[in-house]
Image (cartoon, rainbow, N blue to C red):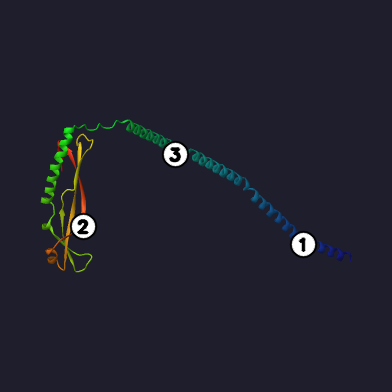
Amino acid sequence: MVKSTIGCCFAILCSFALASAPCAASAADAKAGKTVAESKSKAPQKPVKTADKTASKATGKQAAKTVAASAKAPAKPAVASKTKGKAMQEAKAESTKAASAKKTAKPAAAAQTTPDQDKRAEESFGTFQQDWMNKLHQFGYYGPSHVKVDEDENQKGSYVAKYTEVMDPQGSEVKKSGNKASPYVGTLKYERWDYVCRGCNPEEAKKGPFKPESRELITEVFRYSDGKWVY
């Protein structure tokens, strides 16, 4: 009876020991895993902090360089602006100097003429203007011999023949110019008349009779130089 009881107790103890062994192993393994995990998580922290500090220092240096460069950049435009301002001041000074010189400049002396010269210029201009009118009649496209025919713009199918005639002078005048090289100027006024005739064809329009349709007042100016009138 005693032996059987002892055997039973021994068997129970053995079973309890076997059951406790896996739990202890599991606890040991868990503790070992925790230690490894902690060592892995703690170990890289120092290099990371060093890298962050290095990066921060590099970024700070780069920012400082950028700020310094931006602070120096406006220096060139300032010099250019100064140069431009100086050029404008010089230009203004030159303009003021030129205006002052213009104000103080003496006007050119007027040409001095005598009464005899005045009379000679006026008398010679009468001869000159008659000669000029003769040249117009002789070499100009005036008179019935220079008829021109065109289609009538106001009436379709009709033609207009036209020529221009130079009339006699209506007046002339001689004035002093104040110029030493050309002390006198002369003006001559005359009229040009347009004569027209209309017909159903060019031949009929040329036959006439021609009638005055329009006129134009012409004023010409001539100069007196070296003792004579110039065309």
- Given the image, on which type of amino acid does mark 3 rest? Pro
**Residue annotated with mark 2:** 214
Q: Quadrant of residue 26?
A: bottom right
| One can see residue 33 in this view | yes
Q: CA distance from mark 3 to mark 2?
A: 71 Å
Kindly check if marks 3 and 2 are in contact, taking CB atoms under 8 A apart as contact. no
Q: Earlier in the sequence, mark 1 or mark 3?
A: 1
Q: CA distance from mark 1 to mark 3?
A: 90 Å
Q: CA distance from mark 1 to mark 2?
A: 144 Å
Q: Secondary structure at mark 2?
A: strand
**Residue annotated with mark 1:** 19
Q: Quadrant of residue 206?
A: bottom left
Q: Secondary structure at mark 3?
A: helix
Q: Earlier in the sequence, mark 1 or mark 2?
A: 1
- Given the image, on which type of amino acid does mark 2 rest? Ser
Circle 2 crowding by C-alpha within 10 Å: few under 14, some 14–19, many from 20: few
Tag nearer the camera, 1 or 3: 3
| One can see residue 187 in this view | no
**Residue annotated with mark 3:** 77
